[in-house]
């Protein structure tokens, strides 16, 4: 099974709301990732968790707060977002060592109004 | 820093025709190269990967890619394109557990 699941599929939120995106994998992967993808662009890395610890934060604004409660789950907490944060948010997972392929979830389409 | 270039932003081919999508990577001691496909509004699906060994790699959906170190290229090919292949294609290099993506190539298929 190479499935990464993400919920919700779509999310519309106001600039004052707090919401969370969820990601789950059961492949035993110990690295998990959040990406942001704008239309017609490649995914941009936001965060990397390795063995449930944040290992990379690509200078993401603090209104995005990641959390890795256990080795199978990854959350992205959203607060006080801006309209320019509207995008497709993708979760991925992989083995930790360099070179392993990443498996992507279907994404959450986020619209900030 | 690693970089990946996909020179073609858009490509249009007729259904049944052959396809080649270009990818160039910047020099690295051991490139770990991937091709992903993305349908509109969907996640990325891994088509194939190259780590080492045979430079011609086979993937899913009838795709293959050839690694050419002398040309720093990893081009994706398919002998006969189907309408369902219309999508965005991304080449990527894995550098230290971070994927570096090319800009993508949008494939359109004419009936």
Image (cartoon, grey):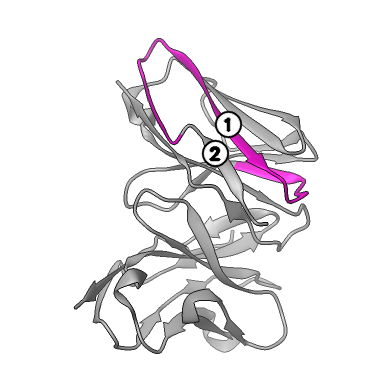
Residue B67 in picture, x, y percent from top left: 58, 83
Q: Main secondary structure of the magenta part?
A: strand
* Residue at figure coordinates x 64%, y 39% from the top left: A24
Task: From this view, report whether residue A88 is shown above or below residue B108.
Answer: above
Q: Which numbered marker is on residue A22?
A: 1
* Earlier-in-chain disc, 1 versus 2: 2
Q: Is residue A55 left or right of residue B65?
A: right
Instruction: State the residue at coordinates (54%, 75%).
Output: B60
**x and y percent of residue B70 in the render?**
57, 88
The magenta stretch spans which residues?
A9-33
Residue A3 shows in the view: yes
Q: Is residue A92 magenta?
A: no
Q: Are marks 1 and 2 in contact (CB under 8 Å)?
A: yes
Q: Quadrant of residue B106?
A: bottom left
Compared to residue A37, the image places residue A22 above or below, namely above
In the picture, the disc for residue A6 is 2
- The residue lying at 56 percent from left, 33 percent from top is A59
Q: Secondary structure at mark 1?
A: strand
Q: Is residue B45 left or right of residue A74?
A: left
Considering the numbered disc 2 on the image, is that residue within a helix, a strand or a loop? strand
Can residue B75 be seen? Answer: no
Q: How far apart are the alpha carbons under marks 1 and 2?
A: 6 Å
């Amino acid at each position: 099974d190479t499935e990464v699941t993400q919920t919700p599929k779509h999310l519309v939120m106001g600039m004052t709301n707090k919401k969370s995106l969820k990601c789950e994998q059961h492949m035993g992967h110990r690295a998990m990732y959040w990406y942001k993808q704008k239309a017609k662009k490649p995914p941009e890395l936001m965060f990397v968790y390795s063995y449930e610890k944040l290992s990379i934060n690509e200078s993401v604004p603090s209104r995005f707060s990641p959390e890795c409660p256990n080795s199978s789950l990854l959350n992205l907490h959203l607060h006080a977002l801006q309209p320019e944060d509207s995008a497709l948010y993708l979760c991925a997972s992989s083995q930790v060592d360099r070179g392993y392929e990443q498996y992507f979830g279907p994404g959450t389409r986020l619209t900030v109004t | 820093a690693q970089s990946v270039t996909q020179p073609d932003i858009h490509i249009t081919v007729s259904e049944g025709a052959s396809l080649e999508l270009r990818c160039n990577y910047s020099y690295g001691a051991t490139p770990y190269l991937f091709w992903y496909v993305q349908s509109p509004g969907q996640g990325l699906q891994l088509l194939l990967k190259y780590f080492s060994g045979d430079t011609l790699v086979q993937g899913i959906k009838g795709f293959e890619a050839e690694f050419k170190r002398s040309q720093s290229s990893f081009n994706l090919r398919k002998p006969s394109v189907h309408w369902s292949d219309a999508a965005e294609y991304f080449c990527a290099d894995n550098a230290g557990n971070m994927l570096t993506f090319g800009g993508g190539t949008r494939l359109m298929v004419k009936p």
